[in-house]
Image (cartoon, helix red, strand yellow):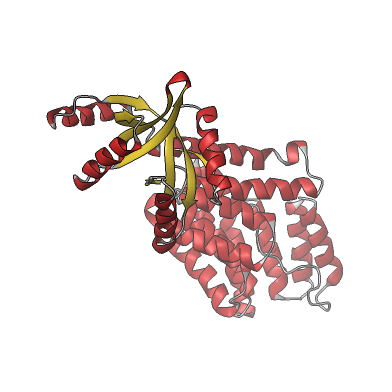
Amino acid sequence: MMKRRCLWGALMLLLVCGPGRGWCQDAAPGSFDRGLRLMESGRYADAIEAFSSSLGAGQADSRIYNNRGIAWFYLENYARAIADYDRALDLDPSYDKAWCNRGTARLSQGDFEGGVADCRRALEINSDYAEAYHQLGLAFALFPDRKRRDPALGVRYAQKAAALKEDVIFLDALAAAYDAAGKPKAAVETQQTVIARLTSEGREGHALQPYAERLEHYRRHLELKIRERSRPYTIQVGSFRDRGRADHLIRDLENRGDAVFTSRARLSEKGIWQRVFVGHYQNYYAAKRAAIGLKRRKFKHYQVVKMPLAVEVASHQDAESMAAVEEALRRRGWLAYRMADPAGEAQERLLVGAFQRKDQARELLERLRAAGFKARLATR
């Protein structure tokens, strides 16, 4: 499994803030432009020589120091990079890119406070500086020292960067922040968007591999979260052909405070029966322990069953909207119940029925859709 430290390093190296090609034209443009071209081709040591030539010609320009610092950064010589960023800021204290770059280098050195302070200073100068938000998002979500992390804050910074600038680098970092914050579903969806955009740009094969590896990493986290939060087991306490008898038991259980729900079952020659269930449990043993409690309450008929599927009719809505859907279902004879979304982040869903197989759930799914409800199959 991909380690957070490796992911931190990979994403930190994706973006360092340069000035672009349209810088000051009167500061040894030949050497400077050559340095930029060398950096673009990954020849960082040669780029440093070119930038140094510009400085040797007497052109003490903050942008030359900033770019030489970037070259040192990519050679992972963070001390030399910081020294060049210091010189850039001495010459121009309002140079937002140099503040952000120094912050990135400090973070790479392990200086969390200094790095965060520099990136925030860049935002004080330029409040719409997407790259600074990006670096802060990475810092709070993925910094190797877990004690320094605040993944929720990291997500907010990463969201701001992605909103300010449409760039797959920022979306890639946002996916990582979501995963660090315990939101693997959002991470998977965001990373799928990253790969779709890169594919549309003509990327393929090895160029997509690191992005695909991160997507698989997030998917494993999502699968694990679903397994941990799913509650497929329940206890069947009755099965009736007479709907009135089922309703009587339901009212009795509701009055006792039990988490009760029903599911209609078509039993070949026996016709349609109303099954009544109590509770939602992660595994058989938890359900069995609860069933013993029902036995003590003089229940004569009960059975632990695995019902991993249901039909979802509402999710992630406000309490008033959920209650309105619940009442609409009840008026039509369906008893809905609420469960947390195993793939979501503390979100509630409104479910109807419980089934072992998809084919068993499809009849209810179609009936609910025909009645105007936005229904879909879901995992309990």
Question: In this view of the protein, can residue 248 be seen by the observer?
Answer: yes
Q: Residue furthest top?
A: 269
Nearest to the observer: residue 348 or residue 331: 331
Q: Tell me: residue 5, above or below residue 74.
A: above
The answer to which of 79 and 301 lies nearer the viewer is 301
Q: Residue 218 lies in what quarter of the image?
A: top right
Percent coordinates x, y for residue 267 in the rendering: 44, 23
Q: Tell me: 365 left or right of 341.
A: right
Residue at 42% x, 38% y: name it. Answer: 353
Above or below: residue 97 compared with residue 107: below
Spot occupied by residue 312 in the image (x, y as percentages of width and height):
48, 44
Q: Residue at x 42, y 21 (%)?
A: 270
Residue 335 placement: quadrant: top left
x and y percent of residue 223 in the render? 49, 35
Residue 68 position (above or below residue 266) = below
Q: Is residue 134 left or right of residue 337?
A: right
- Count of marks placed on residues: 0
Residue lying at the far right in this picture: please name it.
Answer: 30
Q: Position of residue 125 (x, y in %)?
A: 58, 79
Q: Tell which of 3 and 165 is nearer to you.
A: 165
Q: In the figure, 285 relative to 201: above or below?
A: above
Give the quadrant of residue 298: top left
10 horizontally vs 304: left or right = right
Which residue is located at x 58 percent, y 56 percent? 78
Q: Is residue 145 visible in this depiction of the protein?
A: no
Residue at image location 65% in from the left, 39% down from the top: 212
Q: Quadrant of the C terminus?
A: top left
